[in-house]
Amino acid sequence: MCDHSPNCPSAEAADHEAAKAVLRDAVNGWALLCNGVVRFDDTGEVLPDGRVVAPHRPGHVLQAASS
């Protein structure tokens, strides 16, 4: 699907989220990447083969104030 140079990572690659968005729906919060992955604003994904990747935002680390 990708015609960028260099090519975007495939849907099977570990860095598949780095592919360029070819279509976006900001109202509903998703983007279709050129490798066929649908990425949602909550960081969930649907891969081209139908597998679902749960949202995986990095957690926030809270530090207690030292006294």
Image (spheres, helix red, strand yellow):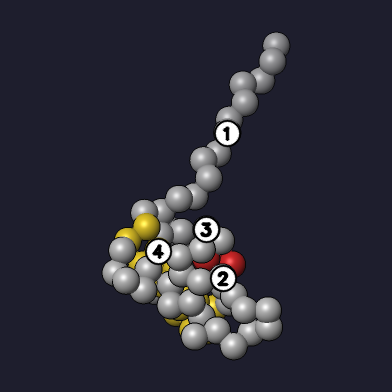
Lower position in the chain sequence, tag 3 or tag 4:
3
Task: Give the x, y percent position of residue 6.
Answer: 68, 79
Question: Which residue has dot 1 on it?
Answer: 61
Real-space Cα separation, disc 2 to disc 4, in angstroms: 15 Å
- Kind of residue at disc 2: Pro
Crowdedness near tag 4: few (<14), some (14–19) or many (≥20) residues, C-alpha within 10 Å: many
Q: Is residue 29 visible?
A: no
Badge 3 marks a residue whose secondary structure is loop
- Kind of residue at disc 3: Ala
Question: Which residue has dot 3 on it?
Answer: 14
Q: Tags 1 and 4 in contact by the CB under 8 Å rule?
A: no
- Kind of residue at disc 4: Glu
Question: Which residue has dot 2 on it?
Answer: 9
- Kind of residue at disc 1: Val
Real-space Cα separation, disc 3 to disc 1, in angstroms: 24 Å
Lower position in the chain sequence, tag 1 or tag 4:
4
**Image quadrant assignment for residue 44:** bottom left
Nearer to me, 34 or 62: 34
Q: Tags 2 and 3 in contact by the CB under 8 Å rule?
A: yes
Nearer the observer, disc 1 or disc 4? Answer: 4
Point out which mark residue 45 bears. 4
